[in-house]
Amino acid sequence: MYLDPPYYPAGGYADFKRYTKEFFYEEDHIELRDEFCRLADIGCFVILTNSNTDFVRRLYDGFDYEAVDSRRNISCNASTRTGQDLIVFSKEVRQSKPTQLILFSGRLLEHFPGTRYMGSKYRLLPFIWECVKDLEFSSVLDAFSGSACVSYMFRQYERRVISNDFLHFAYHFAKALIENSEVHLDENDIDLLIQPNPKAGNFITETFRGLYFNEKENRFLDSLVANIELLKNQFKKSLALSAISRACMKRRARGIFTFIGDRYDDGRRDMRISLQQHFLENIKAFNAAVFNNGHNNMSLNCNVFDLKENVDLVYMDPPYYTPNSDNDYTRRYHFIEGLVRNWKGVEIQYNTKTKKIRRYETPFISKDTVHDAFDKLFAKFRESILVVSYSSNSIPNKADMAGMLKKYKKNVRVYQVEHLYSFGTHNHKVDNNAKRVREFVFVAT
């Protein structure tokens, strides 16, 4: 089997991933890696080509690969037409992993369900780990956990992890994959979840008719939400809510809910298969991601300033305030936020075209309050190692952030790497410079 996917960008303005209106996302590379592993496990000889980058090498760590010089004739700049391809190949069937205690195998976030979540640090995980790997710490608070990929990485490196996020669906991601060490959804659970529930009502069908999903899918959601309430185990509920949250994002072009209808639909498989099929595939994905790292990990759904956890290291990745775009996560993900709460305790703004919910207030969303918010946050966790992810196009700037950290910590180091975000002010403009930034990691000890 020969696989030749759109290449992962090797830097600069490489754009070999844009074959359609949609990117070939990091999650697509992860899913392809998982398929490569599946084929190798059943005895197929597999060859794959991609760019010779750290990301790709880490994805296929454990397999044989060779780097070969290559030439691209499509670049407008002759000096950039040379580079290297990575050829990955399997030689033999790999041995199955033990089931009792699965620790980090060497492949980057193996089994973690990929995400298109706004601001996700998945692609930056090797960089983040390089910044902290030499520090002495055994426990971590991921204060703004989001997709939970950073928390998951720390779990793989055998740290005790506490994940927190103010969004409920993000909390359920962490509940399912960070706090949960052994619970899965079995066949009986799945049968219960997908069967029609005559007592379900039609809130989603009536409220969101014609906005995001078709009539059949809306009825499926109404029934599913009612069936999830029948699950007795809290981790099973979180697994089901996480699976349907990710299913809804994958079923929507660009994975967000800021527009209605079929805009941006490029015909890819995610747009063609049903929401129920997405849900079933995501149950499988989340089940496969559950593992035991030997620690009592936790997930929380709190205002960050109310946390009282005592840990060695606090990792902070708050919403980035930038003049180029808003950082309102609620606006982009209001539908799944309402879904996991069954729209209890949220205010639907019926006058809006998208039927969004009123956003949660945070001091990180305003230029007038963001500096004080960081200062308060650093003061609160001054007894721990402080690690902060932030961007060069955001406020506070690099110097201000370092200055605030130095008020509470003796040593402040700043690491940086060039980065291209998948989401931006104008995501349809692939080379929009607002998305090309330097990503900073501040480490204060």
Image (cartoon, rainbow, N blue to C red):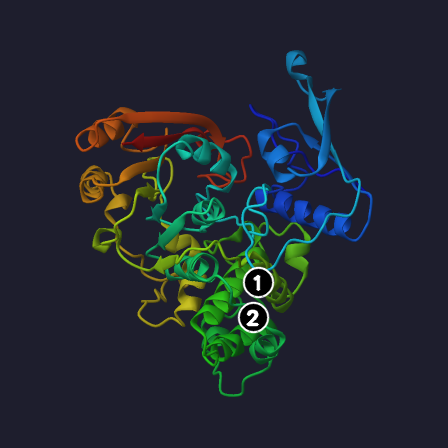
Q: Secondary structure at mark 1?
A: helix
Residue 317 shown left or right of residue 195 in the figure? left
For the view shown, which residue lies furthest in the bottom direction?
198
Q: Amino acid at mark 1?
A: Asn
Contact, CB < 8 Å: mark 2 with mark 1? Answer: yes
Task: Give how far apart the Cα atoms at labels 2 and 1 are.
Answer: 7 Å
Identify the disc placed on residue 287. Answer: 1
Q: Quadrant of the C terminus?
A: top left
Residue 67: percent from the left, percent from the top? 71, 24
Residue 196 in percent (x, y) is at 58, 82
User: What residue does disc 2 label?
Assistant: 185
Quadrant of the image occupied by residue 229: bottom left
Q: Is residue 287 left or right of residue 70?
A: left
The residue drawn where x is 28% and y is 45% is 365
**Residue at the spot 41% in from the left edge and 57% down from the top edge:** 170
Which percent across, then down, holds residue 325?
A: 38, 40
Q: Foreground: 128 or 392?
A: 128
Locate residue 318 relative to residue 193 in the image: left or right: left
Ranked by sequence position, the earlier of labels 2 and 1 is 2
- Taking depth in this image into account, of 293 and 282 the one nearest to the observer is 293
Residue 103, percent from left and from top = 54, 50
Decide if residue 202 is on the left or right side of residue 274. Answer: left
Q: Is residue 190 above or below residue 21?
A: below
